[in-house]
Amino acid sequence: MSSDPDCIFCKIVAGEIPCFKLYEDAATLAFMDINPVNDGHALIIPKAHYADVFAVSGDALAATAAMAKKVAAAVQAALEPAGMNLLQCNGEAANQSVMHFHVHVIPRRIGDDLGMNWELEPGDMDAIGRIAERIHGLSSQIVEGSSAKGYEIMTPRDEQSGSGIVCIRKQGLDSVAIVRELAEKNVVVAPRFGWVRAAPHFYANEDDIARFVELLP
């Protein structure tokens, strides 16, 4: 795997510099931006060193994009921002501050007046750490097998109860349609940003997840 000894992101990958890690797999690493433009600002990088989009391999680009999608979903569930930008910058004029290919996941607030380029301002490390714990605490996985019916399941933590809440979605199936069908079975759920949230009826344990999946269309 290619690496640049002078690259700060390569040093993070190597464990030489600490970070607020969110997710990691064999090819990519996701962590909090310590100069956030908004709360929840995260970065996703390939572990191998590529300077920019012109240098990155197709496989590394695909892996980074897949991780960005996962992180964006977790940030959305954890913070419920009004919008989300996925941004990738190349070169000085595009405000690329680290010459290691990376994708920004930026939660947006209505009226935040965020421009395409921004000044780097250090964030509150304690606050960033707390937000990182909320995002990292979410799990998102495709549960295989006929019993799961192809649904994607996420278990964000409920702030009041402290329990994980079962949220589901399925490619090609409208969340409103799921809500209507479950209502016919007297199961009250609510659509949220494309997900169907099952709280307070079902929580993130194997029995509750199995019971809920059994009711799904």
Image (cartoon, rainbow, N blue to C red):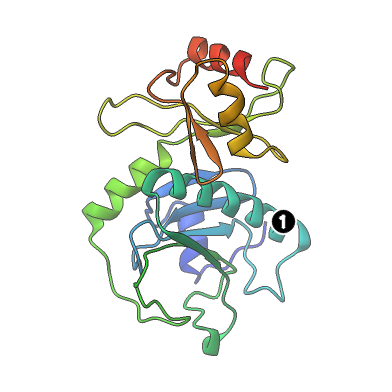
x and y percentages locating residue 131 in the rendered image: 32, 48
Q: Which residue lies furthest to the front in this view?
A: 184
Seen in the picture, residue 10 relative to 209 is either above or below; the reply is below
* Near-viewer residue (77 or 4): 77
Does residue 210 sit above or below 139 in this rendering? Answer: above
The percent coordinates of residue 155 (x first, y second) are 46, 30
Residue 45: give x, y in percent of width and height. 56, 59
Image quarter for residue 58? bottom right
| Residue at the disc numbered 1 | 62
Residue occupying the point 65% across, 69% down: 50
**Residue in view at x 55 percent, y 17 percent:** 212
Q: Return the residue nearer the eye: 1 or 204.
A: 204
- 59 above or below 196? below
Residue shown at 59%/56% (left/top)? 47
Residue 172: which quarter of the image? top right
* Residue 60 relative to residue 156: left or right: right
On screen, residue 194 versus residue 122, left or right, reads right
Kind of residue sitting beneath label 1: Ala
Q: In which quarter of the image is the N terminus?
A: bottom right
Mark 1 lies on a secondary structure that is helix
